Amino acid sequence: MRTEMSMRNLLVFGIAVAGLGLAGCASDADGNESGGNASSGVDPTGNPTTGSSGGSGTGTTDTPEPTTDSPNSTTGGAPPDEPLDPPILFDVLDDPTGGAGGCQGAPNNLALEGTVWAPNGVIPVSGALVYTSAGQPDGIPQEVYCAECEELDCDDRFTTTNADGSFTLNTYAQGANYLVVQKGQFMRVTPINFGAGAETLDDELTTLPGENDPENGLFIPLIAVGNGSYDRLEDGLGKFGLGDTLIENFEERLVPGTEPFDLWDNGQSPTADGFPSQGTFAQLVSSPANLAQYHMIFAPCSTDTYVSSLTPQNIQNIRDWVAAGGRWYASDWSNEWVNLVFPEYQNLSCSGGNCDNGSYDSLADVMDDGLLEWLEAMPAPLQDINPLNDEPHPTLFDLPQVQTVDNWSGIQDILPVLVDDGKGGQIDVGHKVWLQGPGGTIGAVHPLTVTGQFGCGKLQFTSYHMAEFFDYVGLSPQELVLLYTILEIGVCQEALPPPQG
């Protein structure tokens, strides 16, 4: 039997099979209070323009021009007759830290409610930025760039989503000509035309795009995947909504030709599975021009076929690309692509220079509150994919712990990485730990998922596969963790100098 269905239909089917409802919880992202005005950061290319124009009626899905990349956070407004506090610069991962200037805003008269979803339409997006703008925002650069946090215009009302993706945005109708929904380089911009009152937004307006179409206000990260021998990361991206998936014999695979990202041979030619190949990973990292095409590059678990291409020059190419704003990910037996490129960030468990370990599972502790709240807010079918499969898989029923399977590397230590903070001091840009647990050659509890900052970019390493080693349908807990961290490392940040070494 051969079936093809979207992830949304898959999970609707899962609800019917399991007889489960939806579970959710909310964080404390309140947005603007009625009658107030707030400003927030937009990461990359400048402040959106604002203006005043009347509007009434219903929203429209006419497509605008490109927009900007942005951070996430919330701040309260002020009563309409009082001046506002200075505008604030944000990073989604931090609280507001201050700003300069100020402006008097018009009173709010329009409340917008909705839920931000991942491109597959079923995974809620936590901490997404939602704002309205009078003028059309600028676009996300279509190459690697430094996503610094910047201010929104004074009249751009904003909020961020709760752990379950829900939000309420208080704005004023005359200045709400565009609705912007964004998480990192995922952004949707839609012209709207609502009158005063309250509106519940259709999911069509608040679902992150699954394709890159700048002319129509749809942006996703420009992604390169090193096609590996063992970890099917491309299937996980497909289940997230970046492409269509095919379900057959309790296996869910990405359909060739539907992927909005590029695949490069890093141990297995993409053509073996019907995908076009852009070349080898060695060709990718040896060319600054090739690297510059992308916002994110993934090196999932694979053989050592192209590890020999990590020459001093190619290592510098990767470091320069990350410093310019690239997001670099490696997992498991592809550990060389982090450990040799960014050795100052971690010590791995190695023997005789070989850091490839045997397989182990680990019941991991979730170390980040935002990640934990988001996992707790997962729709019921994503908490347990076993009803869709013919063999047992981990669930989310053990929170605040998550079972990870197929760890093949071990992070022995994370190291402090100090850089100048621009204020006469130093700041540690070393790894943040998202999951930690016991097992493997290390035995004791150790980090399993880490991310660090390098210049204007980020690096990420997981000791486990994104996808479990065997075939299954749906998104496993460790795939969900990886998707959350991929979204988080895409958000804006303070530009800091890269460590020297």
Image (tube, helix red, strand yellow):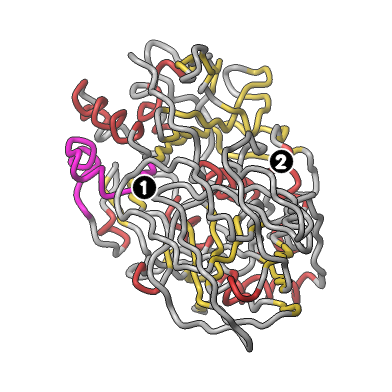
**Amino acid type, mark 1:** His
The part of the chain drawn in magenta is: 278-299
Task: Tell me what residue is drawn at x 57 percent, y 38 percent.
Answer: 100
Could you say which quadrant of the image residue 68 lies in? bottom left
Q: What element carries label 2?
A: strand
Q: Do the residues labelled 1 and 2 touch (CB within 8 Å)?
A: no
Residue 325 at what x, y percent from top left?
37, 38
**Amino acid type, mark 2:** Val
Residue at label 1? Answer: 295
Which is closer to the viewer, label 1 or label 2?
Answer: 1
> Residue 491 versus residue 335: which sits nearer the camera?
491
Q: Which mark is residue 462?
A: none
> Residue 237 versus residue 29: which sits nearer the camera?
29
Q: How crowded is mark 2: few (under 14 residues within 10 Å), some or many (20 or more)?
A: many
Q: Within the magenta stretch, is there residue 448?
A: no
Task: Tell me what residue is drawn at x 29 percent, y 62 percent.
Answer: 275
Residue 414 at what x, y percent from top left?
55, 18
